[in-house]
Image (cartoon, rainbow, N blue to C red):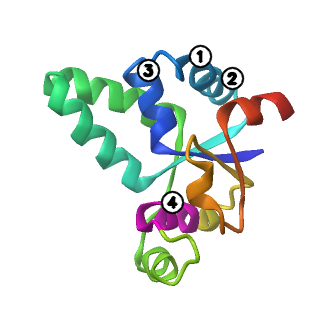
């Protein structure tokens, strides 16, 4: 199964967010063990770098980012993705870009803690715990 992992799930692991850490780590483990083909959106990479370098030394932040990109494939963002996102029924533009990027990458689903933001998505969307229960 190909799954696009939303930025919030990546940050749950990197920032060790107590309430969300365990299921997010389990998703990382599925990716690491090649049980799922996991993707992140290209925009997630820059967002993670921006947030990590605000709280960590640059070298440490970049090491974390290197680990992330070794685990996950990168779903592309190009002009076609942006144009489709502009016309998407998903009203949050960042989420629309994520969905359209996932479509280009051929993912089967999106894993996020913001399922409600993807109300009109044409790809299946799961909370981490929900995904883990069916996987």
- Magenta segment boundaries in residue numbering: 92-101
Structural distance between the alpha carbons of marks 4 and 2: 24 Å
Q: Is residue 51 left or right of residue 81?
A: left
Tell me if residue 129 comes above or below residue 42 in the rendering: above
Is mark 4 in CB contact (under 8 Å) with mark 2? no
Which residue does the numbered mark 2 point to in the structure image?
33
Please state, as top left, top right, bottom left or bottom right, where the C terminus lies in the image.
Answer: top right
Q: Main secondary structure of the magenta part?
A: helix
| Residue 34, image x, y percentages | 70, 30
Residue 17 is tagged as: 3
Which residue does the numbered mark 4 point to in the structure image?
98
Q: Earlier in the sequence, mark 4 or mark 1?
A: 1
Which residue does the numbered mark 1 point to in the structure image?
22
Q: Nearer the viewer, residue 53 or 16?
A: 16
- The tally of labels here is 4
Under tag 1, what secondary structure?
Answer: helix
Q: Earlier in the sequence, mark 2 or mark 1?
A: 1
Structural distance between the alpha carbons of marks 1 and 3: 9 Å
Under tag 3, what secondary structure?
Answer: loop
Structural distance between the alpha carbons of marks 2 and 1: 16 Å
Q: Earlier in the sequence, mark 3 or mark 2?
A: 3
Residue 52 is tagged as: none
Is mark 1 in CB contact (under 8 Å) with mark 3? no
| Residue 124, image x, y percentages | 74, 56
Which label sits in the foreground, 4 or 3?
3
């Amino acid at each position: 199964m190909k799954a696009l992992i939303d930025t919030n799930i990546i940050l749950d692991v990197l920032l060790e967010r107590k309430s969300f850490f365990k299921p997010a780590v389990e998703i990382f483990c599925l990716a690491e063990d090649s049980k799922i083909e996991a993707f992140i959106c290209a925009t997630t990479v820059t967002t993670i770098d921006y947030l990590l370098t605000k709280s960590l030394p640059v070298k440490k932040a970049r090491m974390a980012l290197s680990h992330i990109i070794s685990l996950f494939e990168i779903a592309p963002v190009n002009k076609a993705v942006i144009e489709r996102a502009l016309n998407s029924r998903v009203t949050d533009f960042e989420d629309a870009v994520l969905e359209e990027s996932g479509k280009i990458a051929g993912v089967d689903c999106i894993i996020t803690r913001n399922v409600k933001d993807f109300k009109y998505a044409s790809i299946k969307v799961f909370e981490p715990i929900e995904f883990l229960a069916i996987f």
